[in-house]
Amino acid sequence: MRFARFRHGRRQGYALVEGELLRPIVGSPFGRWRSGEEIVPLARVRLLAPVRPTKILAVALNYRSHLHQFDQSSAPANPELFLKPPSAVIGPEEAIVLPATAARVDYEGELVAVVGRRARDVTPDEALAYVLGYTCGNDVSARDWQQGDRQWWRAKGCDTFAPLGPWIATNLDPTNLELQTRVNGEVVQHTNTSLLIHDVARLLSFASQVMTLEPGDVLFTGTPGTTAPLKGGDVVEVEVEGIGVLRNRVEAAV
């Protein structure tokens, strides 16, 4: 199934995606729900970020193809997790805004896991049972701030630096999904999640030993390869097999 969060006129909620149609549901995919009778054409709604997380976890250096960019000679023994603020979230077709004082802002296409129920102290064998599904994400990063600051709060946490969407797809195997990032139609990242250093189950279990994960929280699982800077006017697309395409335009700050 695919769950989209949408706005149609004054109405806002979740719906099942059925091809080019949406079927609004009564309730929430994070609890009890049932499908409604109404059908709405997808083209007539505005898709919103599929979740409103209480926290966003992300992991650095989780593909070997990405290690060389940061002069890392070996993979981290434990997941290198960090937090992004919920205020950074935007949805499909919304603009990534480049801060006026940042010299370089890069794309980072990623598979994102969406927590479906409260998770605390779960084992890797249990972890995937706590996942509702998966979506596409872009861990937008101001590289000069990331390299110059002692903390990553502004490099990773600016408004618009956590695009998510287009919806949540359930019943996927997160260990074998093709991922592509495109800028203006050109493929700039391409990998398979089988190449993750720490897989989704390991990441969720590791995080849950420290903090309680709530329904709707999200985990960015890492970006592959070499990234490059964005500029105003660019269009970034992150596509994950079995999910769809997250598309965002890029704007320079006024």
Image (spheres, helix red, strand yellow):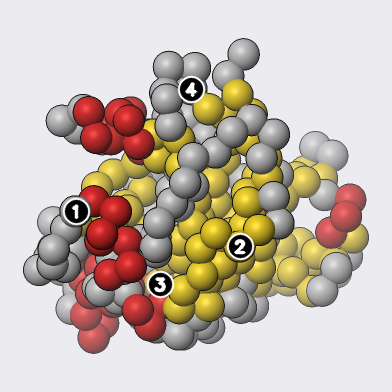
Instruction: Name the residue beneath numbered marker 3.
Output: 131
Front residue of 97 and 47: 97
Q: Earlier in the sequence, mark 3 or mark 4?
A: 4
Identify the secondary structure beneath mark 1.
loop
- Judge left or right: residue 45 versus residue 81: right
| Residue 39, percent from left and from top | 88, 65
Looking at the rendered structure, which numbered label has been put on residue 187? Answer: 2
Q: Which of marks 1 and 2 is nearer the N terminus?
A: 1
Which of the two discs, 2 and 3, sits closer to the camera?
2
Q: From the image, which quarter does the N terminus lie in?
A: bottom right
Looking at the rendered structure, which numbered label has been put on residue 99? Answer: 4
Q: Which of marks 3 and 1 is nearer the N terminus?
A: 1
- Residue for point 49% across, 17% down: 100
Which of the two discs, 1 and 4, sits closer to the camera?
1
Q: Which of marks 2 and 3 is nearer the N terminus?
A: 3
| Residue 227, percent from left and from top | 43, 51
| Residue 180, percent from left and from top | 56, 67
Q: What is the spatial separation of the Cα atoms under label 2 and label 4, in whole angstroms?
A: 25 Å
Q: How would you rate the neighbour count of disc 4 (Cα within 10 Å): few for under 14, some for 14-19, many for 20 or more?
A: some
